[in-house]
Image (spheres, rainbow, N blue to C red):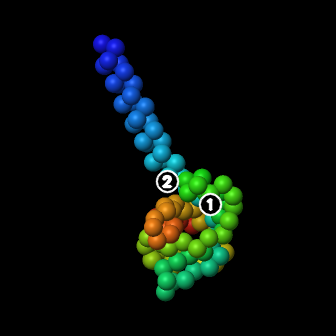
Amino acid sequence: MKSINRIAAALALTLGLTFGAAAAQSAPISGEVKKIDESAGKITLKHGAAKSLGMDEPMTMVYRVKDPAWLKQVKVGDKVTFEAEEAASGYTVTKMEKAK
């Protein structure tokens, strides 16, 4: 019985860590559009700390966008919330919408 409890506890811990990490990776980031480069599929965003990307300080960065159509929905100066991930080719915005 003790081994079953240990297995259940280990499984619960593993699932908690897995889902906790997934939640941290998809935390929304608040930012402001500084530049749009539709031909390159890139956007420059000034944003606060992005803990989900390991960035503890506010900064301005160029991101690729998963869906180039998003670049037509925003303009320089717009406030946005976005999610991004790091890949071998750099950082990519995986979700973006105008802030309310």
The residue carrying pointer 1 sits among few (fewer than 14), some (14 to 19) or many (20 or more) residues within 10 Å by Cα, namely some
Q: Residue at x 62, y 57 (%)?
A: 55
Measuring 52% from the left and 77% from the top, which residue is drawn there? 42
- Horizontal relation, residue 95 to residue 79: left or right: left
What's the amino acid at mark 2?
Ser
Asked if residue 73 lies left or right of residue 10, the reply is right
Farthest residue, direction right: 58
> Which residue ends up furthest to the top in the rendered image?
1
Quadrant (top left/top right/bottom left/bottom right) for the N terminus: top left
Q: Which residue is mark 2?
A: 26
Residue 91 in the image, given as x and y percentages of width and height: 51, 67
Q: Is residue 68 visible?
A: yes
- Total labels: the figure holds 2
**Image-quadrant location for residue 7:** top left
- Give the answer, above or below, for where 19 lies relative to 73: above
Mark 1 element type: strand
For the residues bearing labels 1 and 2, Cβ distance under 8 angstroms: no
Q: Residue under circle 1?
A: 30
**Which amino acid does the dot numbered 1 rest on?**
Ser
Find residue 27 and report its horizontal and vertical position in percent. Answer: 54, 52
Q: Nearer the viewer, mark 1 or mark 2?
A: 2
User: Looking at this rendering, what residue extends furthest in the bottom direction?
Assistant: 39
Q: Residue at x 54, y 72 (%)?
A: 63
Of residues 72 and 89, the one drawn nearer to the viewer in this rendering = 89
Please, is residue 26 above or below residue 13 in the view? below
- Above or below, 38 relative to 51: below
Element carrying mark 2: loop
Q: Which quadrant would the C terminus be assigned to in this image?
A: bottom right
Q: Position of residue 60 (x, y in %)?
A: 66, 69
Q: CA distance from mark 1 to mark 2?
A: 13 Å
